[in-house]
């Protein structure tokens, strides 16, 4: 705990030194960090005497411990903190850096903390041989005053830990510091004034060293200072009392921090590893007090050179130049319309010509078609007429031919007939007598009467003779039968009489009755016999007279029948039936 | 869109939409009619067009155009044009006819000469004038009748060119009367023979082939 007693011993000197600085601060610091703030302000106020270049750095330091302080510090950096004061800044840093270096040299003061700090930061700083006399004067003159402040600053800076930015700033710082009091710089982005997060507490606090001309620092009061408001207002608490309380608080805080720092720490991780907090308690509990950190990176493009601003030329108003155009100068209708007219007329004529030609062609075609049709119809009619004529001619020819053929045929036939006739005449001339002769010989020529007698009369005659003969034969037979009957009767009668008394004595059996009956019979026989010869005569006569007189024959037969009726009806009936049946029997075979 | 008063470029020139069509029809008519005096004919054309009358345009182009030096200048096509323009009325005004004659670029002397054949007052029967014109076209009576038939017929061109026999006989009598050489008896007998052939056809139309023997060029 070497630094702490040193600080304690030195702070009263500070506080006493610039007592007026506190009210002059533009904004009173927030109560939580009032201790630190007031400290730095006081430091600033004191620096107002020593070196003004410290001004831009002060609020940055003050704001570093807390994140929110970063916003506050934005308003604090003075507008005068332009890149114009490199030299002074360098001087200020040099002033800051040197006492810190001295402390590291002292073996008693915080050896563990400051050991890993690379000592290479200083050599470039020292080697730059900044010619600023103000810088050197302070470096040599007042390091024992400033040591505690620097320590504090370094502590703060350790928390902020802008390790990578420091080297570049150092190089930046050194190069313009070569040319004393001359300043040239290119437009550049403002350097990142502090880190958002602390990388680790072990990192050395390296802040860019700003050099600047103190004469341009606003905080340097030039001229009379009597007009400046000084002294505390009545009604306010005693600043010394307040300061004391703050001091006590600050001391307690610092002590705690120092204890923290003095604790043995985990050794540094090997290359490529890093430490991670691990809970080793029995129960896992959420770490609520840890700030959740998220690393974000953003790389913006390199700044381009701003193009040179073009020369501002105000917009023109009003007319500068005018051109007078007379009527018809720009547009000549006759001239302009000419191509159009040419197209119109040319196209029209061309198309009209085409159409006329086309229509003419079509009309010609149609006309010739009609003409040919007309011609064709005429020719067709002519052809029809000729065909008709031809047909008529042919018919006429056929008819004539037919006629001629007929004539020829008839002529031929006639001639043939004539020839045949002549031939026949000649051929038949001697045939006729011989034919007649042979015919006559053949009996084709006969006497009709003779033939009639032969055919008709003679058979009839024979027939009639036969009949007559038959009649006579029948009569005789009948007579024989009668006689026989009579004879038999008489014989029987005679026999009967002989048996009985002979009253009448018949002569030989036929005497008696025969005698009586004989005359009768004889008469009848006579008559019959007489009539018989008469009849054939009459028959012959009648035949002679009318050979084919059936009536006569019938009369004759009826007479004969009447004659025969009395004799034997049965026989007559037989004969008549035979006669009647004869024609039928004749027909039958 | 109303056009601005002043024109600045050729695109502002507006062509009426009917103009090209009218121009084309006119050009076609001019090409087809081949008038000797285009201006005179155009005046007649457009006046007829505006009045809605039949246009003085030939139906067909006539290649051997009358030169008006050796011949009368009158052609069958021109007569047909006149017929088309005048036939709707039975009688035509001579002044009107003269105007039409002039519009067809025909010499007015011919018109007067035609009228001297059959002098009349301010009115004339159209068919007679047509007959006179036909007689001017063809030298003989027969050829003038042929022209007349071809003008008057309703048949398509190249067809049989039939006209009613009444018209034919009327014109024939009229024309033969003009010629004092032909006795009237001959005319009547000729017409009677023609009438027989026509009546045999039963439509009362007489065709070109009935009286005019075609001499075809081979």
Image (cartoon, coloured by chain):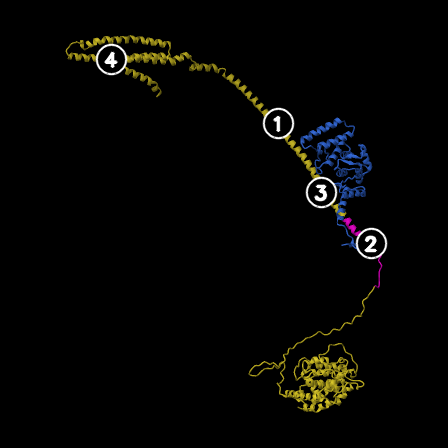
Which mark is first along the chain, 2 or 1?
2
A170 lies above or below B42: below
Q: Pointer 3: what residue?
A: A362
Distance between the alpha carbons at the discs numbered 1 and 3: 49 Å
Label 1 SS: helix
Which mark is first along the chain, 3 or 1?
3
Looking at the image, is mark 4 or mark 2 nearer the viewer? 2
Disc 4 to disc 3: CB gap under 8 Å = no
Q: Pointer 2: what residue?
A: A332
Q: Which mark is residue A482?
A: 4
Judge the density around disc 4: few (<14), some (14-19), many (≥20) Cα neighbours within 10 Å: some
Looking at the image, is mark 2 or mark 3 nearer the viewer? 2
Question: Are marks 2 and 3 in one subunit?
Answer: yes
Give residue B81's position: percent from left, percent from top.
76, 39
Q: Pointer 1: what residue?
A: A396
Which mark is first along the chain, 3 or 2?
2
Looking at the image, is mark 1 or mark 4 nearer the viewer? 4
Which mark is first along the chain, 2 or 4?
2
Judge the density around disc 2: few (<14), some (14-19), many (≥20) Cα neighbours within 10 Å: some
Question: Are marks 4 and 3 in one subunit?
Answer: yes
In this view, the residue in front, A248 or A431, is: A248
Give residue A57's position: percent from left, percent from top.
73, 83
Q: Is residue A568 left or right of residue A372?
A: left
Q: Colour of chain B?
A: blue
Distance between the alpha carbons at the discs numbered 1 and 2: 93 Å
Q: Colour of chain A?
A: yellow
In this view, the residue in front, A342 or A372, is: A342
Distance between the alpha carbons at the discs numbered 2 and 3: 44 Å
């Amino acid at each position: 705990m070497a630094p702490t007693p040193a600080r304690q011993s030195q702070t009263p000197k500070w506080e006493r030194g610039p007592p007026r600085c506190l009210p002059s601060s533009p904004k009173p610091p927030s109560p939580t960090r009032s201790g630190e703030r007031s400290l730095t302000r006081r430091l600033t106020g004191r620096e107002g005497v020593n070196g003004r270049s410290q001004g831009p750095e002060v609020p940055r330091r003050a704001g570093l411990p807390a994140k929110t302080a970063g916003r506050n510090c934005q308003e604090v950096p003075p507008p005068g903190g332009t890149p114009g004061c490199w030299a002074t800044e360098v001087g200020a840093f040099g002033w800051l850096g040197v006492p810190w270096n001295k402390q590291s040299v002292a073996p008693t003061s915080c050896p563990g903390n400051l050991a890993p700090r690379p000592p290479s930061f200083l050599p470039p700083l020292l080697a730059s041989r900044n010619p600023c006399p103000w810088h050197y004067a302070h470096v040599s003159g007042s390091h024992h005053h400033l040591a505690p402040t620097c320590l504090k600053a370094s502590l703060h800076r350790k928390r902020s830990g802008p390790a990578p930015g420091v080297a570049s700033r150092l190089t930046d710082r050194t190069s313009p510091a070569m040319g004393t009091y001359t300043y040239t710089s290119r437009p550049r982005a403002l350097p990142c004034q502090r880190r958002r997060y602390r990388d680790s507490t072990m990192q050395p606090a390296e802040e860019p060293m700003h050099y600047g001309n103190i004469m341009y620092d606003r905080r340097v009061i030039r001229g009379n200072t009597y007009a400046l408001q000084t002294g505390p207002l009545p009604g306010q608490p005693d600043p010394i009392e307040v300061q004391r309380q703050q001091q006590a608080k600050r001391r307690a805080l610092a002590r705690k921090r120092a204890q923290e720092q003095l604790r043995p720490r985990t050794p540094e991780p090997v290359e490529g590893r890093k430490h991670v907090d691990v809970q080793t308690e029995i129960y896992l509990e959420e770490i609520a007090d840890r700030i959740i950190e998220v690393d974000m990176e953003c790389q913006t493009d390199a700044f381009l050179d701003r193009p040179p601003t073009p020369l501002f030329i105000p917009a023109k108003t009003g007319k500068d130049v005018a051109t007078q155009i007379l009527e018809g100068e720009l547009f000549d209708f006759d001239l302009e319309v000419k191509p159009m007219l040419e197209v119109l007329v040319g196209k029209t004529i061309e198309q009209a010509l085409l159409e006329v030609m086309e229509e003419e062609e079509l009309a010609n075609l149609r006309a010739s078609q009609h003409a040919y049709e007309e011609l064709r119809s005429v020719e067709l009619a002519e052809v029809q007429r000729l065909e008709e004529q031809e047909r008529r001619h042919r018919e006429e020819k056929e008819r004539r031919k037919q006629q001629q053929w007929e004539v020829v045929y008839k002529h031929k036939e006639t001639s043939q007939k004539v020839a045949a006739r002549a031939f026949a005449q000649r051929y038949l001339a001697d045939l006729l007598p011989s034919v007649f002769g042979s015919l006559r010989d053949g009996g084709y020529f006969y006497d009709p009467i003779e033939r009639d007698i032969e055919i008709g009369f003679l058979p009839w005659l024979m027939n009639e003779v036969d009949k007559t003969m038959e009649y006579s034969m029948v009569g005789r037979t009948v007579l024989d039968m009668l006689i026989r009957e009579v004879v038999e009767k008489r014989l029987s009668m005679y026999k009967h009489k002989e048996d009985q008394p002979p009253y009448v004595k018949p002569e030989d059996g036929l005497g008696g009755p025969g005698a009586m009956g004989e005359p009768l019979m004889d008469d009848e026989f006579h008559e019959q016999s007489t009539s018989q010869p008469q009849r054939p005569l009459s028959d012959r006569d009648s035949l002679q007279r009318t050979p084919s007189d059936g009536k006569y024959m019938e009369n004759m037969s009826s007479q004969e029948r009447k004659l025969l009726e009395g004799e034997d009806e049965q026989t007559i009936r037989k004969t008549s039936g035979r006669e009647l049946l004869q024609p039928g029997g004749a027909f039958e075979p | 869109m109303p056009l601005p008063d002043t024109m600045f470029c050729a695109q502002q020139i507006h062509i009426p939409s009917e103009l090209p069509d009218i121009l084309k029809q006119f050009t076609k008519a001019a090409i087809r009619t081949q008038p000797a005096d285009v201006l005179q004919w155009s005046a007649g054309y457009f006046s007829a067009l505006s009045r809605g009358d039949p246009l003085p345009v030939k139906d067909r182009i006539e290649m051997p155009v009358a030169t008006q030096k050796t011949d009368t200048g009158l052609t069958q096509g021109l007569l047909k044009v006149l017929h088309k323009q005048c036939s709707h009325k039975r009688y035509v005004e001579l002044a009107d006819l003269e105007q039409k004659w002039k519009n067809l670029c025909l010499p007015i002397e011919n018109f007067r000469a035609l009228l001297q054949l059959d002098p009349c007052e301010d009115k004339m029967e159209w068919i007679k004038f047509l007959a006179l014109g036909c007689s001017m076209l063809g030298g003989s009576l027969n050829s003038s009748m042929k022209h007349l038939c071809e003008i008057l017929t309703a048949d398509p061109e190249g067809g049989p060119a039939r006209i009613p026999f009444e018209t034919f006989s009327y014109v024939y009598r009229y024309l033969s009367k003009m010629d004092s050489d032909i006795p009237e008896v001959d005319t009547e007998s000729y017409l009677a023979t023609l009438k027989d052939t026509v009546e045999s056809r039963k439509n009362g139309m007489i065709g070109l082939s009935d009286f005019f023997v075609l001499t075809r060029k081979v």
